[in-house]
Image: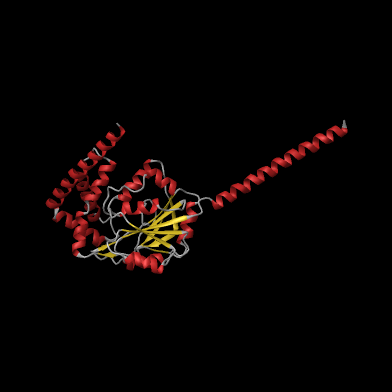
Amino acid sequence: MAARGALCNFQLKSHLSGLAWLWLWNYWAWIVNRAFEFRMMTIVIPTCERPDFIVKCLDKLSRADEVIVTDDSSGNATRDLIRNRYPNATWLRGPRRGPAANRNRGALNATGDLVAFVDDDCIPVEDWVEKMGRALTDAELVEGKTICISKTNHPLEEVVENLAGGLLWSCNLGIRKDLFLRMGGFDEDFLEAGGEDLEFAWRLKGNGQRAVFAPEAIVYHPARRLSVNRWMYRVFQDRWHLLYRLKVAPSRPAACGECIDLIRSTARLLAGRVRDQRRARMLGLGARWVLFPVWIVYLSRWENRFRQMLARKSHNALDRLA
């Protein structure tokens, strides 16, 4: 009986020891998988006619697994530059349908499990690739910190910053490729920059995705000093924000929404609630009020065009399902 009891105890201890080793083995396997999961990241840089800018960006990405430059330029200056100076980067001809389609072209050709977007005029910090990749090991969606250190508060200056998160600017954005594909990428109805970021962020949030802010993944975005003509064009580029409104809330009058925002923004400025880029904001709002009769008619006509376009797309989609 004593021998049988000892044998049972020995078998029980052996069994428990085997379970412990099995648990330990599975635990280490989990750690290894987490360490090497989605280890390859593709950097996508959309560009158009800015070879002088993209050099500073590419110089900071030498440690990236893969870099894809999608080029909407009409000439070959950027292509030749990349082939001569950056043989590890891949150059692709862009679709020439705006930055949204350009980013999608790069992401679709990415071989990495992770995709990080950075604009051609941005300058990442030295370890941006590592910081963004590390953040994406624990999150599906990451927005980095975007800083504009060259801003001067000039009235014709355009500043892009994301200092605290919650904006999802595509100039410093990381996402797992499978999520990007599930979401359908950026909306290619936006043929110019001016709403595609907002629309993509809206879809992500609507599908329960919440971005992790990685303040250590920093890119520097230069302030853009606009010419008077380019600044005036920006005023009428509000039409792309109309398209965003129609995507988000198609039953609401989009041009009316722009007017309400104009009133609210003006009230905030006059109440002293706006301090950053105050002179530029004041000039922009003032121009819209001075040009209001022309501006509102222009937006109303574009709202009608966009509504017709969206109706045709919806009709064609129903025909394909029939």
Q: Position of residue 142 (x, y in %)?
A: 43, 52
Q: Which residue is more in the foreground, 131 or 281?
A: 131
Q: Is residue 73 visible?
A: yes
**60 left or right of 302?**
right
Quarter placement of the N terminus: top right
**Figure disc tally:** 0
Q: Position of residue 124 (x, y in %)?
A: 41, 63
> In the figure, residue 273 lies in which quadrant?
bottom left
**28 left or right of 246?**
right
**Looking at the image, which residue sits at the far right?**
2
Q: Residue at x 74, y 38 (%)?
A: 15
Q: Residue at x 25, y 36 (%)?
A: 315
- Rendered image coloring scheme: secondary structure
**72 left or right of 308?**
right
User: In the picture shown, does residue 257 fall above or below 1?
Assistant: below
Q: Which residue is more in the foreground, 290 or 312?
A: 312
Q: Position of residue 78 (x, y in %)?
A: 33, 65
Q: Position of residue 244 (x, y in %)?
A: 27, 46
Q: Is residue 150 visible?
A: no
**69 left or right of 244?**
right
Quarter placement of the C terminus: top left
